[in-house]
Image (spheres, grey):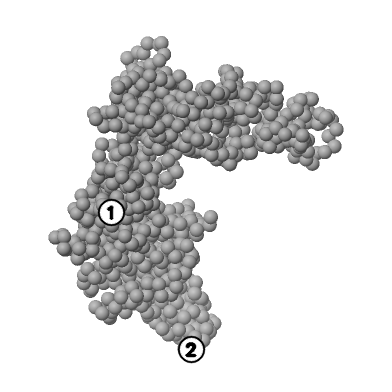
Amino acid sequence: MTDMDQFKRTYFEECGELLGDVESTLSEMRDAGATADGLNAVFRGVHTIKGGGGAFGFEDLVTFAHGYETLLDMLRDGRVDCTTEIVDLLLRANDIVAGLVGAAESGESLGEDYGADIKSKIEAAISGDAPSDAAASQVDVPQNASSADDGGIKTYIVEFIPNLDLLQNASEPLLLIRQLGSLGEIVSEVIADKVPSLDELNPEEVFLTWRFILKSDCSEEEIREVFEFVEDDCVLKISVDSEVVPEAAEDSEPEAVESTPAADVEPKVAQVKTAPPAGQAPTKAPAVSSMRVDLDKVDRMVNMVGELVITQAMIQEQLRNSTVEMSAELERGLEDLTHHTRELQESVMAIRAQPVKSVFARMPRLVRELSETLEKEVKIVTSGEDTEVDKTVVEQLGDPLMHMIRNSVDHGIEMPDDREAAGKPREGTVHLSAEHRSGRIVISIQDDGAGINRERVLGKAREKGLIGKNDVLSDEEIDNLIFHPGFSTAQTVSNVSGRGVGMDVVKQNIRNMGGRINIDNEPGQGTKFSLSLPLTLAVLDGMVIGVGEEIYILPLTNIIETLRPVEKDVNALVGCFDVLSIRGEYVPILYVRDVFGIKNAKQDITKSLVVLVETEDSKKIGLVVDEMLGQSQVVIKSLEANYQAIHGVSGATILGSGRVALILDVIGLSDLIGSQSDQKNLEKLVVTKSKSNDDIVAEDRTQVV
Amino acid sequence: MSKKVMFVDDSKTIREMLDFTLKGAGYETLQGEDGVDALQVLGDNKMDVIITDLNMPNMDGITLIKKLREHPVHRSTPILVLTTESQTEKKMEGKQAGATGWIVKPFTPDKLLATIDRVII
Amino acid sequence: MESVAEKVESGSSDDGEIHDSETLQFITFRVGEEEYGVDIMSVLEIKGWSETTRLPNSPEYMKGVINLRGVIVPIFDLRLRFSMGDTEVTKTHVVVIVSIEGRDVGILVDAVSDILTIYEHDIRPIPDVDESSRSEFLKGLVTVNERMVSLLDIEKLFHVGELENIEGIE
């Protein structure tokens, strides 16, 4: 990768951040009115994007951003009023900038008229309100247009009379002379008649005047450029000596050139004037200081801390199991180690934590665009944007959230007239919020729309054969049908939600993150979707369970309760699966020993334990296990890194003993319900028929899943 | 001894490019993300030149320049402001606050180095 | 077949007329009466057998997974892979950890025997007559001190496609 590519990558990353910030600031201003801070922030963002774009030669982007920036500048100093229409225009302009940045990144061309309508609206806003200023601020006219067109050597007489305070800005006459000298042959003359006596001399003031004779083929413009920075701090007179200066003329005072600078440097160095008290400026810095760290470095640290947690658990277990008596000191040391390790782990995880703001910020625009397309009136209210969660979770949250918001606006919120007829405000509201709740982050998307029409969902499900003609479903079950693969309730497939990606994919995404999704549907009043997600995808609180000689981890979040069943409560559903009656409710049960083919597990269910677990869609199943071995926070390891995914297993972890334990995937297991009865029957067959049952067990498995 | 340049810009892109160009030309560099950050990073380290953007959060370039001009160590350090062509008035504002000169964005590495050369002894 | 390959320590080949051929190094190990070799470049480490955690619904030759310094590594039983019966693991059994296309996997063998340095041209192709399923996982054969060593093609043996096939079995 070249350096340029590296810079570009940084630039596009930065643009992404800036565009997001600008977007959310504008969205805020649209709802709450413009503020000076807001406008400044937006201006800065656009300005930075433009600046970088210029550096890389993204002409289209720079041209567009320029107009956008000009308008922003005028808004800032009040030359143009910041009305809602203007904010809307700014938002659209931001979209165009995003498009142009995207095009610059991918290298594609969007065509010349891309954003032309917005551009002309911006121009209208600029010129309509303050034509003269706009024009002035756009052109940087060269101060002196008289250029040397003949290209021949001319003799210039340059008179440089600095103001007394030239040095205030750390300008250095010596450097000016040096630079002027680089243009051609130069003869300089110092006029020192204004220099006061030594006791009156202020070393920070300039009393000298220079006169140069410059022989050069340069233009007057180039000479002025040398004095560009000090133009306002001096009087500069440039004239062309029409007569050809004789060669000999320059011999006259060559020493002056040498001596002048030296004489001038001295006063500048000798700064003795009393300075303001030291330490005044730099000490009071209220801002939170931060540093950028490569994510790889953080991840390496997260991994190492994960290892440390395991090692610590291992030491603890080894010591507990050893016959050596532990001294009080060792005990205390061990406790401290546990404590510190846990704290270290939390701090490291906190580094990866990010507010969900970055994801939430993308939603107002989505709602705005959608409601325009659908001709609905919808506003989005967000809260809890500062709630923090692991970076990975934030990154994976975007897509499902977008789909759910889209779903709410498309299917939830009614048309304005319908709303009015139903006695609701014409404008619908989608409330997006985040909060921490018992070690998880809960994100809810609530709309005040029509709610899920259960009749329609049911009809559709029957029509599609998702459920039987005569199945009776609870309200909750009906609501959850929308997560069924391929389910779409929109009567006409709109180009908003109807494009293949359904709520089933959303659910799958959330599930993959170890999350749950709940629907709270009140027909006529609206729908609330709640996502509950782990704060991190790296550790998990689990129940350690034993089946035969195997040890598994069951995520605590899935567990409702544990019970020891009585024989009469367990019934076989003919041709299906066993069910357990719990307080009048029948819950299907799954024998972990059977689905995982574990030998030596308890066969008598009354001696086993049933762990009642709940899946995201509030489906309950009972897992039959041998024993509970305790609770533990475990570090999640991937099976797929070196092997592959296993059905019913979400990952693995390393126990204190150093052994690997599998983490159960409750949803994956619940899919196995129903298949186990077939397997049981098959296994019986296999055992009676076969001598080398290995082969047949393998065969039998082909039919399990 | 190599010359020391500090640059202050809220854009990471610009900072990276400046850093690359300047280090490549043999300068030692210090960076700041905004005025507040710059003052903190800078402390009492004498620079040969300080380059600053004008539009920055927390503390803008103008305020930074004013603070530097009041600072016992930095009051005579050349300061260049980063500005865009459209901001003629910005150059002047920078000058009034005490800047030595300006660099017009976008700039090429050559232009950057030449401009620094114009103000650095 | 004459002995053309030499162990590292026994010096260079007597006939030594071909030196332009690349030398290759293999780690050899025993499974029952047979000797196999894997390219030394793919071997990460060799460790004693430790108890594995069985993975449900996996082929028999997949012995389960172990914790290798915090990484979950699957262990395959070469004997079962070659349908030579189950390995009754004891403490003397050895696991050779190899890297296959970025995945680290362990191969369970009876014992590691040697490091073998051979010339590339000493590798003989698998005779067509061998119709056992094994032959497709072999790169070739070499003879060392009158013993035949089968060189494993571990990429094929536990190829990603192979791993995917396991999924098909489920």
Q: Look at discs 1 and 2 and give the one toward the viewer.
A: 1
Residue nearest the observer in this picture, A511 or A449: A449
Inspect the image, locate mark 1, and give the three-letter code of the amino acid beneath it: Arg
Residue at (32%, 14%) from the top-left corner? A328
Specify whether C5 is left or right of C114. right
Residue A475 in the image: state x and y as whole percent: 25, 45
- Judging from the image, what secondary structure is the residue with disc 1 in? helix
Q: Which mark identifies residue A360?
A: none
Looking at marks 1 and 2 on the same chain, the residue that comes earlier in the sequence is marked by 2
Q: Which mark identifies residue A243?
A: 2
Residue nearest the observer in this picture, C70 or A364: A364
Residue at (54%, 36%) from the top-left corner? C169
Inspect the image, locate mark 2, and give the three-letter code of the amino acid beneath it: Glu
The image quadrant of residue C84 is: top right
Local crowd size for mark 1, using a 10 Å CA cut-off: few (<14), some (14–19), many (≥20): some
Q: Is residue C47 visible?
A: no
The image quadrant of residue B7 is: bottom left
Local crowd size for mark 2, using a 10 Å CA cut-off: few (<14), some (14–19), many (≥20): few
User: Pointer 1: what residue?
Assistant: A456
Is there a contact, CB below 8 Å, between mark 1 and mark 2?
no
